Image: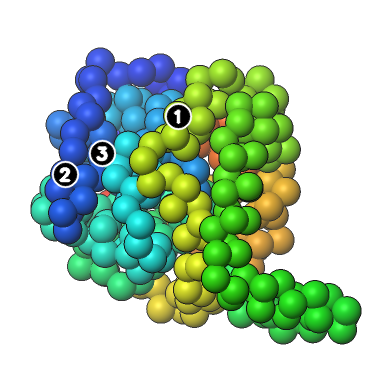
Amino acid sequence: MQLDAIASQPSQSSSESSYWDWNDWRIHYVEAGSTGPNLVLIHGFGASTDHWRKNIEVLSAHYRVWAVDLLGFGRSQKPKITYSADLWRDQLRDFCAQVVQAPVFIAGNSLGGYSALCFAVDCPEWTQGLILLNCAGPFSEDNAVQPPVWRQMIGDLTRNLFKLPGVIEVVSFVLFNRTRNRDHIREILLKVYKDPTAVTDQLIEDIYRPAFDEGALDVFAAVFKQPPGRKLDELLVALKCPLLLLWGNADPWMTTTKALRFQTFYPDAELEWVDAGHCPHDERPEVVNAAIDRWITQVISHKAT
């Protein structure tokens, strides 16, 4: 397949924006390409299918590409419910069964990576391979080191305060209204992108726009209430499919140390560093597109032998 020669150019195919009814909720997705393996792309927290705009058209030259807005994000519906990785795993499972109707290679960034990992572990019949780009989520040992007593006391006080009626809603409202500000979005992105020129007005608008959808505040508040998910090490020891780690090595949130810990628990994982921050697919699409293509080609060739 080899996309190296066209890694920074759009293909001739055009993407199609569609909606799918899932459990009486509207889910937005984008589809491009008509031949080749199925590749599903999952965005991170606060992002959407728009965050894959530099990848979809290029990859669709040789893949059937699907980018999905997780429930609560992008152009998908934003109901007032409890959000969790298990919810998004179920969404991805049903998307593969009802829309794609075939097993997939699945790639996810940050929160989308964690959801994709849960999907790959729990739905092996739908997973041909997993690609994680600066995946979010904690390891068990992250909780092993005890913080100072004063910090524990503050933590306990904060947790008890958040249990009081209405407190989470008030805090969420204040933080949410500060967050859905173009200047604040730019400020955050400049901290997690290595190349400041990649933080464009279009990128900021793609994140800013969904924050004003009906229910967006409820989704933001749900972050404080969501149940803790499984630890990364627990998921990785249960994973059975091929794994590619594409890791922006300048990410201040999901550091290079974290990427190496993924390999500790899944030694067969292939790790490729990308000269980028938290969102390497958007910052260095030419590198990520070519790496995804090479790896999927390699996995398919290996299975054929």
Please state if 116 lies on the left or on the right of 272 as rendered.
Answer: left
Residue 20 disc label? 2
Check whether the beta carbons of the residues at disc 2 and disc 1 lie within 8 A of each other: no
Q: Which quadrant of the rendered structure holds the N terminus?
A: top left
Query: x%, y% of residue 7?
Result: 43, 24
Residue at numbered disc 1? 209
Color scheme of the displayed model: rainbow
Q: Residue at x 15, y 31 (%)?
A: 34
Badge 2 element: strand
Type of amino acid under label 2? Trp
Query: x%, y% of residue 62?
Result: 26, 32
- Answer with mark 2 or mark 3, whichever residue precedes in sequence: 2
Badge 1 element: helix
The image quadrant that residue 142 belongs to is bottom right
Q: Residue at x 46, y 20 (%)?
A: 8
Type of amino acid under label 3? Tyr
Check whether the beta carbons of the residues at disc 2 and disc 3 lie within 8 A of each other: yes
Badge 3 element: strand
Q: Residue at x 40, y 17 (%)?
A: 9
Residue at numbered disc 3? 29
Question: Residues under labels 2 and 3: Cα distance?
Answer: 8 Å
